[in-house]
Amino acid sequence: MRIVVLGAGAVGLTVAAKLSRVADVHAVARKRHADAVRERGLLMTGIWGEGAYRFSCSEDLPDAWQDADYYIIAAKSTDTGAICRQFADAIRGREVMSLQNGIGNEEIIGEFTDRVIGAMIITGFEWRGDASVHVSVEAAPMRLGRYPSGVDDAVETLAALLREAGIRAEATAEIRTDIWSKTLYNCALNPLGAIANVPYGALTDPHAWAIVTAIVGETFRVAEAEGVLLPWETPEEYLAYLRSTQLPATAAHHSSMLQDLTRGRKTEIDFMNGAVAALAGKHGLEAPHNACIAELIRFRERL
């Protein structure tokens, strides 16, 4: 099995490292990470195991890797379009999985191939240096499915390969629901954790939780307007699950947006709270808390 990971950052390189034990893998990454992988391997610590993983890695896609069985796009959502255009000849008509945050990536990929696999992962990946990643927390197994719905042999094969690699993974027929469920989690915690510069566990403070509650209520209503059937019947039911299950599992994690802001990089806010606010407008709904926190993150990006 041949797998190419495009736009490999902390998530993509770590998944590539794990898959390299059970498949032929090539990762396309930034030069400093690609150089480090070639020199001494991807250094991994944390709950997914510890060690150095060696696999093929470069800044581009060699001709020999143009016929992979699966392509995994792990770039920031802001780069999805550019990645697809850059590698359009390779991914056209191929199995392409989006392993990304937020809403809208699968639709972008769908402009280049009709074989789109959506995926959801709630795991904490933190840079510890060039091609050095610490896996800090995991709230649920990775879920993947044919987008927008369904399961087939290609999905089942990739899920089985991920499990063989030591990654908890499940095939699902309702991946759009899972992607929105993770977006609900991300909208609630990611930007607020970045603005406050605190790990997720600190957001149970009553003042922070009031903001979380408002964001969840708005996002829930927008999901319903989009025709997405979430696993929870009400925002209150989700908030109880967030507080009792998801937050304890990821309490020590620092927001990916905080990591982006610290490095002076553009965040994925337009695919999270920004997307929720935009969709709210489309449906004639109000989402002031999502709109406000999106503007705050955009302001921080400019500093």
Image (tube, grey):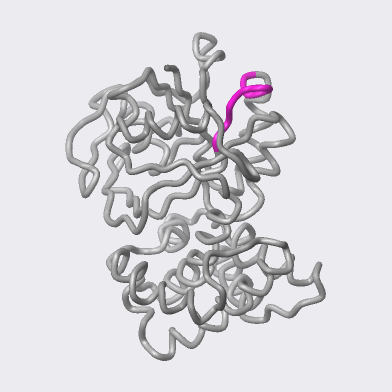
Q: Nearer the viewer, residue 250 or 131?
A: 250
Location of residue 98 with respect to 91 vertically, above or below: below
Location of residue 25 with respect to 63 vertically, above or below: below
Magenta range: 90-97
Q: Position of residue 181 (x, y in %)?
A: 53, 61
What residue sits 34% from the left and 59% below the top? 139
Residue found at the far top of this picture: 64
Location of residue 176 with respect to 27 vertically, above or below: below
What residue sits 63% from the left and 46% below the top? 105
Say which quarter of the image contains residue 270: bottom right
Quarter of the picture containing the N terminus is: top left
Specify whether residue 268 is in view. Answer: yes
Location of residue 50 with respect to 90 vertically, above or below: below
What residue sits 47% from the left and 41% below the top? 171
What residue sits 61% from the left and 73% below the top? 220
Q: How many marks?
A: 0
Say which quarter of the image contains residue 22: top left
Q: Nearer the viewer, residue 88 or 29?
A: 88
Residue found at the far left of this picture: 50
Q: Nearer the viewer, residue 143 or 191?
A: 143
Specify whether residue 266 is in view. Answer: no
Residue found at the far bottom of this picture: 206
Q: Position of residue 198 (x, y in %)?
A: 35, 73
Q: Position of residue 81 (x, y in %)?
A: 67, 39
| 268 part of magenta stretch | no
Quarter of the picture containing the C terminus is: bottom right
